[in-house]
Amino acid sequence: MSTTRHLVNRQRRLATVAAERATTTTTAPPRKPGPPGTSHDKPGGSPAAEDTTVDDEATDDVDTGESQEQEQAESRRERPPGLRIRLPAVLCALTVLLGAFAAWAFSSAAGLRDDPARQNTALTDISRTSEVKGQISEAVGAVFSYDYASPGKSGSAVQSYLVGKAVQQHEDMLAQIRAQGQKQKLVLTTTVTDSGVELLDGDRARLLIFADQSNTRTGKSDETTYAAAMFAVDAVRRGDTWRISAIDTFTQ
């Protein structure tokens, strides 16, 4: 950039000198030849021209120095000293933030993999979901039905379909019906109308049950009452059979 300015300034000054010489030649009277040995007889032009060239070179050198100083000043203004200090600090901060984000993402992904809800295959394993719904619906209908004429049938259903704490829960729920069954000739019928699998994880499942119940007294006069029931059951798979392991009636 400084070389270009140097050439431009030199060309401008040479053009100015040429114009001044042309003007002087036109307006000044012819000079008389001087004695030999004077400066007019020396080849290479007049001393004025030589002095002007020297002055031009000196001026160009001064202009070149000034241009370089201006460029350095502009460079310092464009890149403030603080930039060299702030840039490494910003890069370090970004590195720390990216490292923290990577650690958080890794721990979150591990948490999602360990979350039991993420292991639920109720919506993906259609065959197993249909199997558990069918068997548990049958089990609910069997264990929550009672006929005073054949009370042993209810006991057999308990042995076939209930395990764990569900056995005692069922005993407590139907204790009053068994106590009054023979006297009032009670017939309790439970029919599952709908069910949904909330959780299916291997050999464990949890289902929401909707059922209709009819309770008929066949004593002196037939009297039937109807009720709807909703409750949840936990189920476990033993061999090829799903069994109820817990009953949740949503009451304390």
Image (cartoon, helix red, strand yellow):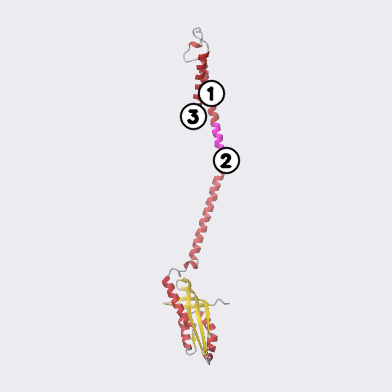
In primary-sequence order, the first of circles 1 and 3 is: 3
Residue projecting furthest to the bottom: 220
Residue depicted at 55% across the width and 35% down the height: 74
Label 2, label 3: how many angstroms apart (C-alpha)?
Answer: 29 Å
Three-letter residue code for mark 1: Ala
Q: At which x and y percent is residue 154?
A: 48, 85
Q: At which x and y percent is residue 185?
A: 51, 90
Packing grade of label 2 (10 A; few <14, some 14-19, many >=20) is few
Q: Are marks 1 and 3 in contact (CB under 8 Å)?
A: no
Residue ID for mark 1? 58
Q: At which x and y percent is residue 89?
A: 56, 47
In primary-sequence order, the first of circles 1 and 2 is: 1
Instruction: Specify start and end residues of the magenta stretch as a single range.
Output: 68-82
Three-letter residue code for mark 3: Thr
Packing grade of label 3 (10 A; few <14, some 14-19, many >=20) is few
Q: Nearer the viewer, mark 2 or mark 3?
A: 3
Callout 2: helix, strand or loop? Answer: helix
Q: Main secondary structure of the magenta part?
A: helix
Mark carried by residue 81: 2
Q: Is residue 130 visible?
A: yes
Three-letter residue code for mark 2: Pro
Mark carried by residue 202: none
Q: Are marks 1 and 2 in contact (CB under 8 Å)?
A: no
Quadrant into which the C terminus falls: bottom right
Residue 167 vs 29, above or below: the answer is below
Label 1, label 2: how many angstroms apart (C-alpha)?
Answer: 34 Å
In primary-sequence order, the first of circles 2 and 3 is: 3
Q: Is residue 199 magenta?
A: no
Q: Is residue 242 visible?
A: no
Label 1, label 3: how many angstroms apart (C-alpha)?
Answer: 16 Å
Q: Nearer the viewer, mark 1 or mark 3?
A: 3
Residue ID for mark 3? 4
